[in-house]
Amino acid sequence: LCDYPLHLGVTEAGPLYQALVKSSIGMGSLLKDGIGDTIRVSITGDPLQEVKAAKTILKSLGLRRDGVDLVSCPTCSRTSVNLDEIVNEASERLDKLNLNLKVAIMGCPVNGPGEAKEADYGIACAKGYGFLFKKGITIKKVKQEEIVDSLIEEILKDEKNEN
């Protein structure tokens, strides 16, 4: 209710993991209620991590759509692939794309497409293969070693067709 922008930040938040938790809770709870105009995430270390964290907080709250929003499930007993490896590779490659998309990488074909139906693109992994889906609809089955390549190829193919 003030006549100037209200800045939010958690100072002395600490190293990466602690800073992410403190900043997400502290600023996120205010931002979701419409309180705050600018933010600063303070992390001991690389200042580029601060920018990435701030963008991620804003994207998580639906206040910014900038770049690929990657979602993935935690691993459970149904996960039969190295999901961490697949997600890390996809994240690295998707970060290089200048596209506003939501991409889901799920550990199993049971809940995968249903839990990620809001995603523009996704993969539901299974032992030895994955199901590539678009807007919640399965479009093809791919070999496990081609999961990330197939996902990126489909995204780029559709992007090329739209332009």
Image: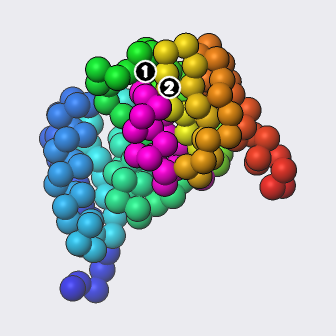
Examine the rendering and report whether any part of residue 80 can be seen: yes
| Left or right, residue 6 beside residue 46 | left
Image label count: 2
User: Quadrant of residue 32 in the image?
Assistant: bottom left
The residue at which mark 1 appears reads as 83
The residue drawn where x is 79% and y is 41% is: 157
Amino acid on which disc 1 is placed: Leu
- Secondary element type, mark 2: strand
Q: Choose between 148 and 144: the one closer to the eye.
A: 144
The residue at which mark 2 appears reads as 125
Q: Residues within 10 Å of mark 2 (few under 14, many from 20)?
A: many
Examine the rendering and report whether any part of residue 52 can be seen: no
Q: Residues under labels 1 and 2: Cα distance?
A: 8 Å
Compared with 58, 79 (above or below) is above
| Residue 42, image x, y percentages | 26, 43
| Residue 89, image x, y percentages | 54, 22
Mark 1–mark 2 contact, CB under 8 Å? Answer: yes
Quadrant (top left/top right/bottom left/bottom right) for the N terminus: bottom left
Answer whether residue 106 is magenta in the image. yes
| Residue 14, image x, y percentages | 17, 34
| Stretch in magenta | 100-119
| Left or right, residue 21 beside residue 104 | left
Q: Choose between 17 and 60: the one closer to the eye.
A: 60
| Mark in the foreground, 1 or 2 | 2
The residue drawn where x is 27% and y is 74% is: 34
Q: Which mark is residue 15?
A: none
The residue drawn where x is 68% and y is 40% is: 139
- Secondary element type, mark 1: helix
Amino acid on which disc 2 is placed: Cys
Question: Mark 1 vs mark 2: which is more N-terminal?
Answer: 1
